[in-house]
Image (cartoon, helix red, strand yellow):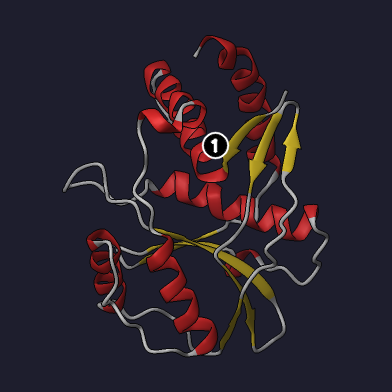
Amino acid sequence: MTIEMSFSALCQYIGASTATARRNILRQQKYPADGPMLSYVAAEQRIISHLVDHAPLDSNVEPAHCREALEMFAGFGWPIRDIVFSRPSTYQPKMLIGLVEISLKPSLLLTDIRGRRGACKLFFRKAPAEDKPQLEEAVARKMASLLYYYGHDFQLESEYAPELCSVWCVRDGEIINSTGRLSRLLDDVKANCAEIELLWPAV
C-alpha cells in the first residue's frame, strides 16, 4: 500500500501548526471526493501555451474561476525575459519516502541564457482570507526547494539552479524561489512522511 500526496499538500502538512489542520490535509488527500478542489487545468494550459509557444494569453475560457485567474495573471509583470520555457515530460517519476508517494510534476521547465535550468509550479488556489497571501511564504519556499531537489538530486540534472526553481502565485503576482538549502527540508519531509504513515489508517 502506498499513500499518495501532492507535493503542495505535503508542504502544507509540514507547515501546518495544529494537529487538526494536519488531519484535514490528510483527509482531503485520502478522500478527495469529500471536498473537491476547483480544477485550474484550463488556465494552466493557457499560461503554458503562452510562455512556451508564445500564443496570445486568451482569458476567454470556461469555467469562470479559470477566466478570473488568467485575467489576474495577465495583470502582473512576470520576469520572463531571457528565459526559455518548455513543457516537462508527461511522465515524471514519483518520489517514494517510506510508504508516501509524492507527485512532483512541475508546470514548466526553465532555461536561462547561461544554460542553467530550473522548474516552476503555477499555483492558482485563492487565499484562505482577504488579508492572507495565496500561499504562506514558508510553504511556497518548501515547494520550490522540493522542485530543486527533484531536478538536481533525484533526476540528477546538474544544471539545475535553486534561483530558477520557484512557485508562481498566479493571483498574487509573486514568485517564491528555492533557497537551495536541502538538508533540513529533507529531514522534515522524512519525519513528516513517517508521521503520515502512522496517522493515515485512522483518518
Residue 66: x %, y % from top left? 30, 63
Residue at point 44% right, 81% down?
79
Q: Position of residue 158 (x, y in %)?
A: 81, 67
Q: In this view, does 70 lie above or below 152?
A: below
Left or right, 61 with respect to 15, comes to left
The residue at the point 56 percent across, 14 percent down is: 199
Query: In the image, is residue 53 above or below residue 202?
Result: below
Identified by mark 1, the residue type is Leu
Q: Nearer the viewer, residue 7 or 28?
A: 28
**Image point 72% across, 26% down: which residue?**
99
- Say which quarter of the image contains residue 64: bottom left
User: Could you tell whether 134 is left or right of 158 in the image?
Assistant: left
Residue assigned mark 1: 10
As helix, strand or loop, the secondary structure at mark 1 comes to: helix
Which corner quadrant holds the N terminus? top right
Q: Position of residue 90 (x, y in %)?
A: 67, 63
Q: In this view, does 152 lie above or below 85?
A: above
Residue extending furthest toward the left = 130
